[in-house]
Image (cartoon, grey):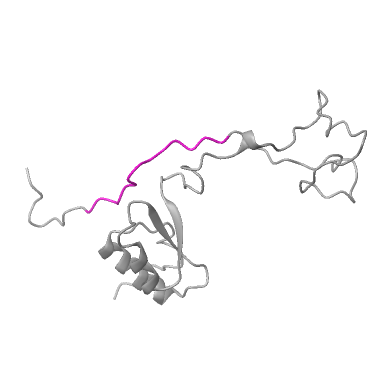
Amino acid sequence: LGPCEHQKPLKMKVQPLVKRKNVHKKLTKFKRFQSDNFMRVDPSWRKPKGIDGRQRRRFKGVAKMPKIGYGTNKKTKHQLPNGFRKFLVANVADLELLLMQNRKYCAEIAHDVSAKKRKAIVERAEQLNVRVTNANAKLRAEEAE
């Protein structure tokens, strides 16, 4: 059975070409050694360099250090949960770049784009069949006249 005459045919959202499972080997951040003991030691990671350091010598019971094995799979790196990679769009012309890549990249409208331009970008993206991650942002419900 086809769609009824009074109904508009539903347009399906574009799906990624290949959707791979995104595996995170370590979800917690690497914290700098003894950053929990001293306010002056910032928690952002620095490699321990001391000659007697327990963490540098990889003793049991000490926090782990970053190593190459924690790296992300290159094929799923920068991939969003929906299977696309993000591409920042500031105007309608930027969308044209995604014409042939609409199954690999999705558009994300930049934060400083006005509501008027956003509307134009979302409309053009629909024509080009490009997924927009933040299509509803800064859009107010139009007043009924």
Q: Is residue 99 above or below residue 56?
A: below
Q: Nearer the viewer, residue 137 or 104?
A: 104
Residue at the limit of the structure toward the top, as seen here: 60
- Give the image location of residue 43, x and y in percent: 79, 47
- Name the residue rendered at 83%, 25% in the picture: 59
Please give the range of residues in magenta.
Answer: 11-24
- Name the residue rendered at 90%, 39% in the picture: 50
- Give the image location of residue 82, x and y in percent: 41, 45
- The N terminus lies in which quarter of the figure? top left
- Name the residue rendered at 30%, 51% in the picture: 14
- Give the image location of residue 54, x and y in percent: 87, 31
Majority secondary structure of magenta residues: loop
- Name the residue rendered at 40%, 76% in the picture: 116
In the picture, measured across the screen, residue 124 lies left or right of residue 139, that is left
Membership of 106 in magenta stretch = no
- The C terminus lies in which quarter of the figure? bottom left
